[in-house]
Amino acid sequence: MSIRINNSADFWADGVFCVPKAVADGLMNFADENKIKALLLILSDTKAVNTAEISEKLKISSDEAEEAVAFWVNEGILIDTEEPEVTVIEKGAEEPKKALESLPVPNLTPKDIVRMCGEQPELADLLRSSEEVLGSTLSNSMKSNIINMATYYGLPVPVIITLLQYYKSERDKGKSITTRTIQQMAKDWANEEIHSLEAASKKLQTIKSCEELWGEVLSLCEIDFRKPTSAQNKMLARWINDFSDEMIFFACNTMKKYTKEEERSVKAVDNILKEWKRKGFKTPDEVKAQPKKDDRKNKDGKLRRKPSFDIDEIAKKAKLNDDYDI
């Protein structure tokens, strides 16, 4: 069937908006219905749109709205318009290291690349090694990205090669990783001062652990699978650093046990774990050992003014607490 646009229809009078060709050329293959709808909604609006509006208009949860927006931000189609916090420097204090975002990343032309490789032979060697790792000829855009990893972000060659090996491995698995994702990783690694092969390998192991944990958590909480946002990945890394898998899975079961199916969320699990960390709990047995509701009485039989948290109370408060960092 041959199809063409009906450019004589009345609905064109309401206006039109542009959609990047990159969306149709491949990104749409990795985007679900919510992500596509959210993008169309944002592109059709002349002002900035927040996730609360997207959630309301598309009749989806706030988590789904945040996930949809984060996907297009990670792909470079959208920009997060929230302004960074201003750091106040006290008199006599050492000035903090300038953030990489303060200067735009150079957009190198083919002439720039040739000139820089001529002036710095190590960059030419880096590009040759990169082609060997990726198994293909580099585009000018990819060459620019790789050179910027070395000259702008200041990453050592072994770290850059490790990043590219990870990119190639994920692509070979059919995962939706793009050059934009690798650029963001390079920026993050520079800010985290990952300047050795050992640190890079440890970082990739953390990423792998977070991916595995995310799938297990969603399955255990009986929540539909979705890719974690960058903030949720940081949350997962915090969980791994603070707790054992046993404790994390116990928190998931606690949340699920005391929460209605439609109200289950990863945020509730995070709140439970935050409370347990504040209380210093390291094992499920320590949580279970806390006084239950029936034990919350003084010797005179009166309830304590501030009863101790048991699992039930923690789960209930988790649903109401909005002190999230994800």
Image (spheres, helix red, strand yellow):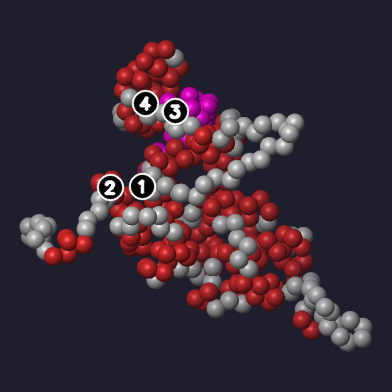
Tell me the residue that label 2 is attached to. Answer: 20
Is residue 135 rendered to the left or right of residue 217? left
Residue 90 colored in magenta in the image: no
| Residue with the most extreme left position | 2
> Label 1: which residue?
77
Cα separation between marks 4 and 2? 22 Å
Q: Give the residue displayed 40% in from the left and 31% down from the top.
A: 145
**Residue 190 vertical position relative to residue 49 in the rendered view, above or below:** above
Q: Would residue 129 appear left or right of 316 to someone viewing this image? A: left
Check disc 3 and report the residue beneath it. 148
Mark 3 and mark 2: Cα distance apart in space? 25 Å
Earlier sequence position, callout 2 versus callout 1 = 2
In front: 62, or 230?
62
On screen, residue 262 above or below 170: below
Coordinates of residue 71 in the picture (x, y in percent)? 41, 52
Determine the secondary structure under disc 2: loop
**Residues drawn in magenta:** 147-171
User: Going from the N terminus, do you reach mark 1 or mark 4 first?
Assistant: 1
Disc 4 marks which residue? 108
Distance between mark 1 and mark 4 Cα atoms: 20 Å
Residue 254 visible from this viewpoint: no
Disc 3, SS: helix
Q: Are marks 1 and 3 in contact (CB under 8 Å)?
A: no
Could you say which is closer to the camera, residue 70 or residue 94?
Answer: 94
Amino acid at the residue labelled 3 = Asn
> Which comes before the other along the chain, label 1 or label 3?
1
